[in-house]
Structures are given as C-alpha cells and as structure tokens.
Amino acid sequence: MGGGPSEDDAAHLAGAAENSLQPSPRGHVVIFLPALNEERAIGHVLDRIPRAQLEAAGYTVSIWVVDGNSTDRTLEVGRKNGASVFIQAGRGKGNGMRQAFDHLLRARDRADGGSREPEFFLMLDADGSYPPEAISTFLDALASGNDVVLGSRFRGRMAEGAMTPLNAIGNRVLSALAHLLFGVSVTDVCTGMWGFKADTLRKIPLEAHGFDLEADLFGSACLSQARITELPIDYDARIGPPKLIPLRTGMQIALRLFVRRLNGPAQPMPRGRLDSTQTTKTPA
C-alpha cells in the first residue's frame, strides 16, 4: 500500500491547496518534520516553530509531520500541536521525504492547474536538535535569490555532546568529498535542516531511501545548477536515542554522492498528475 495523508489530513491538504491560491504578501511556506518514534521531542519542536510570526509577516504556513510508521504517540502529539500528518510507505527517511515532496507538489498542481506552487519548502528533523527559530532566516535567504539553503552546524553553536567525535570527523570528510565531486563548497552536507524554493525542488527529484537523503539533495541541487548557500545554525543534543549507525550510514552517504555524480540528475517529475500507486493511509 502506498503512503499518504490520513483522510482528515488529506481534506486539510485539499483545503490548504485551495486557500493558497489566494495571494499571500510573501508566499506559501510548507514545513516538513521527518519523524520516527519522536513522541518525546516533536511537541517541543512544533511549539518552537514561529508560525504566528511567519503569518504576521505575510506568509501562509502549512506544517507536516512525515511519519515513518511510528509505534509510539508521535502522530497523536503532532496533531495535538497543530500539524498535519503524512504517513510514508516503507521505511527510511529518504523514502518518506521523497513521497511527501512528490505528494505535496502534485496536490498543489492539481489545485491550481500547474500555474503556481508554494514558494518555499523547509525541512528539519523532529528530534529537537535543530532550531525552528531559524526558519525565518532561511526564508530571508531564499527570498534574496538563493534556491537551496543548508543549515551548517559547524558554523554555528554546537551544544556539548550533541555530536560525537566520530560523527564530527565523518561529517567533515563527507563534506570534503561532496566539495570534491561537485565543486560547490559545503561544510555540513549531512545537515538535517534545509530550505528550498518549490520550483527548484521540482528540478531535483530524489532516489535516496534512508539517511543518504541529504547527499542526494546536495548532489542533485549542484547538478541542476541551483544557487546554494549555507547559514550557521545552533545544534543541540537530540531528545531520545540516536537512530543512525555511524559507519554504515557514512558509507551509504559516500556511495550516494558517487552515484549521483556518475549518473547525473534524474528526470524532473511530471506536473499536474498523481501517480496511480499513491493512496491514502489512515493511522490505527
């Protein structure tokens, strides 16, 4: 069975797509929180998203939890705190975000005939380690002419214990590899906080299944000649136990960088129609 929003969230999505056709002074912002068993963290993250501030500044805001089939109260807490939920098919962060990006872009196209899209997509992990307060800064960077914005943990404040020495070394090595392969300077290719213009995101379709998502995003953005910038962000220790296995994940990321470099960008997704395999899924 394919993944998708629950029935209530699908109705919300249709309404949001229709409402976003009404002009907003500064555009439509879609915020994605990929999550798997993050009941301890996700409410805290959602509370910190400056939604009222963004709306007061003229943005229309939608918030989606992209759930990897959590077995705890992640869905319940997410909805209680005002988010809609997209339940992915299968496992893996890359799978979930590919499905969510595709579904939201296509839903917008069906609503407006393919003429306009949400202007900005933001993604940050739901584990409490990334700063939702920085979303406004990301939007400013996108509005000023950048197509893709990465949040660099190495250029900002990193809390003690937030990243192990092994992970820090691995991140720096992988960032150097990304620079070597794609010719674009980057200090934190593995960051979990990104911003995109929607039309740029459409040009960088993805193939990643797991924690190689960010490598796929970066490589595809480089090959599409997107304008990429990094912003310093604060980084805190995650709430709850880590899910990645450093050495195995590092190898997956390196392989994804090489594959993307060798294969080049994938074909952009077609506009204005929904894959016939896409279905909705209602949580138990």
Image (cartoon, rainbow, N blue to C red):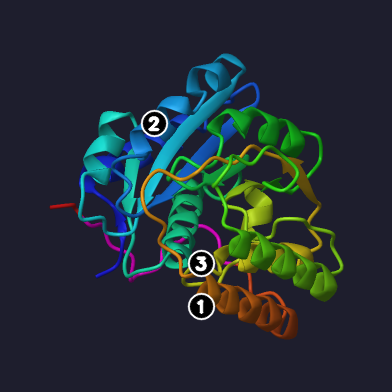
Residue 70 seen: yes
Crowd band around label 1 with a 10 angstrom C-alpha radius: few (<14), some (14–19), many (20+) = few
Is 186 placed left or right of 35 in the picture?
A: right
Which mark sits nearer the N-terminus, 1 or 2?
2
The residue sitting at 55% across, 47% down in the picture is: 162
**Secondary-structure class at tag 2:** helix
| Closest to the observer, 204 or 156 | 156
Q: Mark 2 points at which residue?
A: 44
The numbered dot on residue 248 is 1
Q: In this view, does 182 lie to the left or right of 148?
A: right
Q: Which quadrant holds the N terminus?
A: bottom left
Secondary element type, mark 1:
helix
The residue mark sitting in front, 1 or 3, is 1
Question: Residue 113 or 241: which is nearer the viewer?
Answer: 241
Q: Give the range drawn in magenta.
A: 269-281
Marks 1 and 2 sit apart, C-alpha to C-alpha, by 30 Å
In this rendering, the answer to whether 124 lies above or below 225 is above
Image quarter of residue 201: bottom right
Secondary structure character of the magenta stretch overall: loop
Residue under label 3, please give it.
211
Q: Is residue 204 visible?
A: no
Q: Residues within 10 Å of mark 2 (few under 14, many from 20)?
A: some
Q: How crowded is mark 3: few (under 14 residues within 10 Å), some or many (20 or more)?
A: many
Give the farthest residue toward the left.
284
The residue positioned 62% from the left and 17% from the top of the image is 57
> What amino acid is labelled 3 in the image?
Phe
| 29 or 161, nearer to the observer | 161
Task: Give the CA separation, mark 3 to mark 2.
Answer: 23 Å
